[in-house]
Image (cartoon, rainbow, N blue to C red):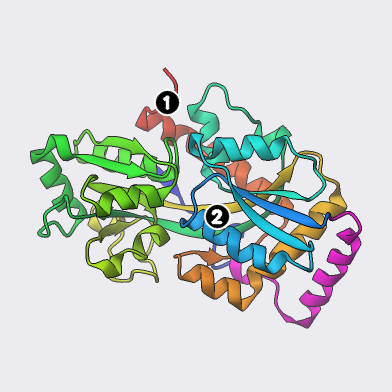
Amino acid sequence: MIDSTPHSGLSPSNLGRRRMLHGAGAAALLATLGRQAMAQVPELARIVTGFAAGGTSDAICRRVATQLAPGYARTAMVENRTGAGGQIAIQFVKSQPADGSTILQTPSSMLTIYPHIYRKLPYDVATDLTPVTVGCVFDFGFAVGPAVPLSVRTMPEFFAWAKTRPDGANFGSPAAGSTPHFIGAMLGKINGVDMRHIAYRGTQPAMLDLLGGNLASVSGPIGDIVQHMPTGKVRMLGVSGADRSRFSPDTPTYKEQGYPQVVAQEWFVFMLPAKADARIVDGLNAALRRALASPEVVESLATFGLEAMSSTPAELAALLREDTRRWAPIVKDVGFTAEP
């Protein structure tokens, strides 16, 4: 069963409204925290993502980077260190000095699901990274392209078609062991279809193959799908939220289409290397929360299907622990392991 909906303390409706900082009092607090840490902040800040340019992970990094300079750092830039489903970026960040100059931005599944599917990871979330803040929350979608007949408009219709075309029953996701991978695998299992999974370095490369007719379907963040829908070549058949997404209100949820056990959301999060000084963590948290509350970032991320939000470091740490526990039985039920 996939049910990774956010809990009350960190839901978009609660954390997003309660924790995102607004008003003059909040601005004063953020400025104070920023000044406390400024002496330790380097001139160059790098936000590292493990996924390709053009995708949702890259989008939030670039929008936030524009807000970090010159207040948090004189210059802020984004580095795309792709590969191994996001592991390369995490491994790189953990090896960097914990001085606030290198910031990891990653989907939470690399931190909460991967420990269940890899016997050995090149990082330990508890000892190699320092939580800073949640960045945003998002739903997942299931899309089809030119390889699937135009008559296929719903999830049940897709799986009925897939049963007649076993060679074409495939789906792409941004990484093996990612949340959208598990969603696609679970949907196939429920429908009795052996869906062949193809892992990509991010959702955008998968979408390009979908548009080219080389891939039947893609399970990925909703924002990576909706941006291609105006072409008329991409149809989104379902979304993973408990309710329909405001970014695609005409697309029914999986739950509406007979899959109540497939409800999932995920977070993008910001982390620092382990043992970062509390002043540095507080300064970066303040700068990121200010950026994530700015109208420019909120509105820009919405175009990618992302709900901007933020948290305290302690709230993020608790969220990661809770999600790690929740994913254990889901991974076992699907039966996927990344290693023989």
Is disc 1 placed on a helix, strand or loop? loop
Q: Are marks 1 and 2 in contact (CB under 8 Å)?
A: no
- What residue appears at the point 68 percent right and 68 percent down from the top-left corner? 67
Residue 90 image position (x, y, % from top left) = 62, 39
Residue 230 image position (x, y, % from top left) = 29, 70
Please state the extent of the stretch shown in magenta in the rendering: 15-41
39 vs 292, nearest the viewer: 39
Residue bearing mark 2: 7
Cα–Cα gap, marks 1 and 2: 27 Å
Q: Is residue 123 magenta?
A: no
Mark 1 or 2, nearer chain start: 2
Is disc 2 placed on a helix, strand or loop? loop
- What residue appears at the point 52 percent right and 33 percent down from the top-left corner? 114
Q: Relative to 29, say whether 138 is above or below.
A: above
Numbered circle sitting on residue 337: 1
147 vs 237, nearest the viewer: 147
Number of numbered discs visible in the structure rendering: 2
Q: Relative to 237, say whether 174 is above or below.
A: above
Numbered circle sitting on residue 209: none
Q: Main secondary structure of the magenta part?
A: helix
